[in-house]
Image (spheres, coloured by chain):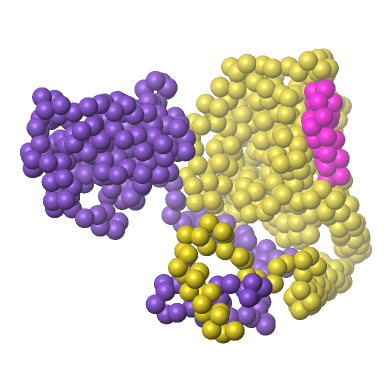
Chain colours: A purple, B yellow
């Protein structure tokens, strides 16, 4: 019994989801590699020279980047955003899971206690200090995956080059999403219910659709304003 | 020199007032510097286009002033001299490289006799009965600059680069010189103005197409340009002989390289492409195209077209291996050249004996062209045979399998213990199933 090969893919019950793709059928005669290009002949010479000559009259791929700004893919990993609940309270609960998930040790979080007089997020705790060091961040997105409240997402802003190291440590004020219409700047009491549960169980959060921007800040059309674009304007 | 210049077979030189000569000297110098600036931008633009890029486009309109800006920048850069450098030679080498490059252009004919401030003078600084040899002499002197800079840098890579450059330039100078022998035979003179004059009706490129092809290949090696730029093979030798040079000295090497390119283009124009003569179609339409100052324009256009071909080569071909390169120079170009010179001189002798040109030409050209045809067919069939052999080898290798051990196609990788533990119910299922089988 013990020397039997254990999980046999062919004899699996149909109810079990296939975790591995089916093994390709064994090929006795594998496909031949493609024919090489006609090098070393007159035709090959003519073809090569013709190609470079013809390329001169084709469209160039150069993008005049600082002068023309091109949109990124919608789910591009740009700088982070700390999102808000629809009433303006912060989603961050100061749990530090993002900081623990970060492989580059780029995130620093200090939690603080909410009080009835001064409430920043629903529930007990909020992120009092929140810093991301963009000299260390590798934009892998593990912090976003770790975030239990979907407070931390990424925007499409990629112009994160500066000549000052200190300025590249973004603080909470820089990372917070802007206040959209209907939002109120914290601290203020919970507006969406009496309990923090109402913020998560109620249908206050739209479901994420595939391919949609991660961040509400992106959806709100926040313009990309980085350092490089300013430099570009200056030169133009 | 003055005795040579006053020789009777190059009339019109050596008798101008000194200030006209000075004007010409300044003119040639300015022409070369401007051509260098132009060719650098032109090359970068064209290569960029060939690679789907724009090329320089920041400085001046369409980036045309880029090389001027680079030149100014180079001149003001910090100069770093290696500790181990042989100082006097280190200083001398760039000068030895740049000065002959400028000198070679002194015999290039820009145009016919023109009236300059009331004096009739040819648009050419000077000419000698052995004018083309001056160009050869200058390009040979340029090799000293290369090899001495490699030596004087006191560093390994420049030394290797310098040696490579020297070997390359000397080897290809042989092929280049031999390719022009046919031109001398054909024109009956070695003075550049005489050779241009002899091409009034037919450009030499048509009767001497083989010489032209060899010349075109040889000068690419002679000027150290891609695909023969082994001397500055970045992947092997950093920058070649000028690795340890910076600032203005580096600029001088750069200048020399591009002037050499202009010089060999001008020489190709003069020797094979009718010099400053306008194309025949244009002459038929406009009879004044070959007189006055206009020929300078045709001359420059021809040079620019040849420089374009240089750039085209660079944009198309990968760098050659050193031994293949030497093989091409010594074992292919030179033997073909010698046979071709024999053919041309035979034709010449027959024509001198009163044979009509078509008879003499066909007697010599037909066998030579036949030979070329046979060689080309042999090459094609050999390459087809090579291809077939390679295909057969690949087929055999495919059937027998590779020579190194590879895992079997149906290799079953055991699951990681962690995963097995995680999906314990599934494992139990599998286990139960195998029990059923058993």
Q: Which residue is depicted at the point 66% across and 51% down?
A: B313
Q: Which residue is more in the foreground, A192 or B369?
A: A192
Residue extent of the magenta highlight: B144-173
- Left or right: B338, with B24 as reference point: right
Magenta-colored stretch includes residue B172: yes
Classified by dominant secondary structure, the portion drawn in magenta counts as helix
Residue B401, above or below A79:
below
Residue B403 in percent (x, y) is at: 80, 68
Residue A69 in percent (x, y) is at: 33, 42
Q: Which residue is depicted at the point 82% across and 22% down?
A: B154
Q: Quadrant of the C terminus of chain B?
A: bottom right
Q: Which residue is more in the foreground, B225 or B320?
A: B320
Magenta-colored stretch includes residue B218: no
Residue B75 in percent (x, y) is at: 61, 19
Q: Which residue is more in the foreground, A178 or B242?
A: A178
Q: Which residue is depicted at the point 8% across and 42% down?
A: A193
Residue A56 in percent (x, y) is at: 51, 54
Residue A30, above or below B280:
below
Residue A43 seen in the current view:
no
Q: Quadrant of the N terminus of chain B?
A: top right
């Amino acid at each position: 019994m013990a020397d039997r090969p254990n999980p046999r893919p062919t004899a699996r019950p149909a109810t079990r989801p296939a975790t591995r793709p089916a093994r390709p059928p064994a090929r006795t005669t594998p496909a031949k590699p493609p024919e090489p290009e006609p090098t070393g002949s007159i035709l090959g010479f003519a073809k090569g020279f013709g190609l470079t000559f013809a390329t001169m009259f084709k469209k160039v791929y150069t993008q005049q980047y600082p002068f023309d700004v091109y949109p990124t893919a919608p789910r591009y990993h740009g700088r982070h955003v700390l999102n808000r609940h629809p009433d303006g309270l912060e989603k961050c609960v100061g749990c530090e899971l993002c900081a623990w998930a970060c492989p580059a040790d780029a995130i620093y979080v200090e939690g603080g206690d909410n009080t009835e007089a001064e409430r920043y997020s629903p529930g007990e705790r909020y992120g009092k200090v929140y810093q991301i060091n963009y000299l260390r961040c590798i934009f892998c997105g593990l912090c976003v995956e770790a975030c239990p409240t979907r407070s931390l997402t990424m925007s499409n802003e990629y112009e994160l080059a500066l000549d000052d190291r200190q300025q590249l440590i973004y603080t909470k004020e820089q990372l917070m999403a802007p206040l959209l219409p209907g939002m109120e700047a914290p601290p203020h009491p919970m507006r969406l219910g009496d309990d923090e549960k109402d913020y998560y169980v109620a249908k206050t959060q739209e479901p994420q659709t595939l391919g949609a921007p991660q961040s509400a800040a992106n959806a709100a059309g926040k313009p990309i304003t980085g350092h490089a674009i300013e430099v570009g304007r200056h030169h133009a | 020199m003055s005795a040579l210049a006053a020789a009777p077979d190059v009339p019109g030189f050596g008798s101008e007032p000194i200030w006209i000569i000075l004007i010409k000297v300044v003119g040639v110098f300015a022409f070369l510097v401007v051509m260098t600036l132009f060719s650098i931008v032109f090359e970068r633009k064209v290569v960029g286009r060939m690679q789907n890029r724009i090329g320089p486009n920041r400085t001046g309109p369409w980036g045309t002033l880029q090389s001027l800006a680079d030149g100014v920048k180079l001149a003001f850069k910090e100069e770093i001299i290696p500790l181990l450098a042989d100082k006097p030679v280190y200083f001398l080498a760039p000068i030895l490289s740049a000065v002959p490059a400028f000198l070679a252009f002194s015999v290039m004919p820009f145009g016919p006799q023109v009236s300059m401030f009331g004096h009739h003078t040819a648009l050419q600084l000077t000419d000698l009965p052995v004018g083309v040899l001056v160009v050869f002499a200058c390009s040979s002197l340029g090799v000293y600059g290369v090899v001495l800079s490699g030596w004087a840098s006191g560093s390994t890579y420049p030394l290797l680069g310098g040696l490579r450059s020297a070997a390359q330039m000397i080897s290809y100078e042989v092929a280049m010189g031999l390719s022009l022998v046919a031109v001398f035979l054909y024109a009956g003179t070695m003075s550049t103005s005489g050779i241009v004059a002899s091409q009034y009706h037919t450009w030499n490129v048509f009767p001497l197409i083989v010489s032209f092809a060899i010349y075109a290949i040889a000068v690419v090696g002679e000027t150290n340009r891609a695909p023969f730029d082994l001397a500055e093979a970045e992947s092997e030798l950093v920058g070649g002989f000028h690795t340890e040079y910076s600032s203005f000295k580096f600029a001088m090497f750069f200048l020399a390289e591009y002037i050499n390119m202009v010089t060999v283009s001008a020489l190709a124009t003069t020797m094979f492409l009718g010099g400053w003569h306008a194309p025949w179609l244009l002459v038929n339409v406009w009879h004044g195209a070959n007189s006055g100052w206009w020929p300078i324009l045709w001359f420059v256009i021809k040079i620019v077209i040849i420089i374009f071909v240089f750039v085209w080569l660079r944009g198309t071909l990968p760098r050659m291996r050193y031994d293949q390169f030497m093989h091409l120079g010594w074992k292919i170009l030179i033997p073909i050249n010698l046979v071709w010179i024999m053919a041309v001189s035979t034709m010449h002798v027959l024509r001198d004996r009163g044979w009509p040109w078509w008879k003499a030409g066909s007697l010599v050209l037909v066998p030579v062209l036949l030979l070329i045809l046979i060689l080309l067919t042999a090459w094609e069939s050999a390459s087809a045979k090579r291809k077939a052999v390679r295909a057969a080898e690949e087929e055999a290798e495919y059937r027998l399998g590779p020579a190194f051990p590879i895992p079997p196609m149906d290799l079953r990788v055991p699951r990681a213990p962690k995963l097995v533990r995680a999906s314990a119910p599934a494992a139990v299922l599998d286990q139960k199933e195998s029990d059923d089988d058993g």
